[in-house]
Amino acid sequence: MSSTSPTDLKAMKAWIYNSTSGGLQNNIKSVDDAALPFKQPFPDDGILVKVHYSALNPADYKFPELGLVGRAVMPTPASPGLDYSGVIAQLGSAVEGFKVGDKVFGRITPNRFGTLSEYVLARVSGCAVLPEGVSLQDASCIGTAGQTAYQCIVPNVQKGDKIFINGGSGGTGTFGIQIAKAIGCYVTTSCSGKNADFCRNLGADGVIDYTTENVSEVLKSKGQVYKLVVDNVGSTPTDLHKAADHFLLPDGKFVQIGGQFTLADINTILSRRFLPSFLGGGKRKWEYLVTEDKHEQLEQIGKWMQEGKVKAAIDEVFQYEDVPKAFEKLRQGRVKGKIVVKGSV
Ligand SMILES: NC(=O)c1ccc[n+]([C@@H]2O[C@H](COP(=O)([O-])OP(=O)(O)OC[C@H]3O[C@@H](n4cnc5c(N)ncnc54)[C@H](OP(=O)(O)O)[C@@H]3O)[C@@H](O)[C@H]2O)c1
């Protein structure tokens, strides 16, 4: 561990990329002289965290690989990564509720100083103190997947409601199943047969194997009983929103987060959003949710973790040196829960 005080820092370790041609994992490299994520004077609202763990999300490679659009959001050289856990090294003068040395976890808003770095600059909205008894490794998983699942589910249901989660075995799905159970809902989810027991063990009451069953038809056969659909997949089945006319309650809601930056998936999103029902569109309320950082939600999920109601479902922990391998695995789209990367400390 470096003994340098943050105020003396001139540079830091980080995984950076300048190009994503041929895939982020083939371009990203580890350096010891990356730019720091802040300029002096240290920002009043800044929380400088020494990163102990970072959890990966599909957005970590999807946005950088968007070409010009990606570079407009994140000019290169840039480090990927949104989710972190670690120890506070320096605090801005306006930050309340934290102190140097606190163990914390959370998420940063996308910018070119990502969490696959030695230090990350967090804000209060995306930072929470680690609850006693929760490990930094587990808490690193919460930032994006936990908050996304929370924002899809908690505002839209009440205890006893039925939820369908399309895609229960990935990062957002594993948090979604557990959060829905923590607030007393009945959960049906889709996953491949090999992950059915995994989803049941997380609390799913019903599982539909999307590799052998027609997900939309199975749901339609249940009648209008669901209050909420959370679509973590987006692309499959494409008729899910239309089919929801038959299995979502009339005041139910369809929340989508998943999808690829492909013409087919953009077309699915546009038709779900704009196609009127008389032209074949679905009737149920549809929303594309974009995750926001909410300090109170991070705290709540951390509390559920402390109480054992929500667990971090970790597929694999990679060493800091193995970031390219971690991305190779992530982009195959078959991750069970989360991929975590150890920090450089
Ligand atoms: N809008 C936002 O703000 C936001 C926030 C977070 C995530 N997202 C997006 O949401 C999506 C999910 O994110 P994530 O972190 O959960 O991804 P992830 O962890 O990479 O998801 C992988 C999981 O998806 C499952 N899966 C793949 N195809 C499926 C299908 N047709 N039906 C059911 N399950 C399927 C896989 O299971 P099998 O191996 O069994 O196929 C695997 O367990 C991504 O597109 C991500 O970019 C958006």
Image (cartoon, rainbow, N blue to C red):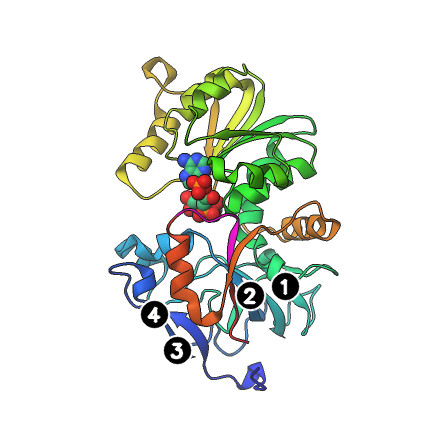
Query: The magenta stretch spans which residues?
Result: 333-339
Give the x, y percent position of residue 259.
38, 40
Sequence order check, earlier mark of 4 and 3: 3
Q: Which residue is mark 4?
A: 77
Callout 3: SS: strand
Q: Residue furthest left?
A: 21
- What amino acid type should be assigned to the residue bearing mark 4? Pro
Q: Is mark 4 in CB contact (under 8 Å) with mark 3?
A: no
Q: Which residue is mark 1?
A: 136
Sequence order check, earlier mark of 2 and 3: 3
- Mark 1 burial class by Cα count in 10 Å: few <14, some 14-19, many 20+: many
Sequence order check, earlier mark of 4 and 1: 4
- Mark 3 burial class by Cα count in 10 Å: few <14, some 14-19, many 20+: few
Magenta segment includes 338: yes
Distance CA(mark 4)–CA(mark 3): 11 Å
- Mark 2 burial class by Cα count in 10 Å: few <14, some 14-19, many 20+: many
Answer with the quarter of the image where residue 65 lies.
bottom left
Q: Is mark 1 in CB contact (under 8 Å) with mark 2?
A: yes
Distance CA(mark 1)–CA(mark 2): 7 Å
Distance CA(mark 4)–CA(mark 1): 28 Å
Sequence order check, earlier mark of 4 and 2: 2
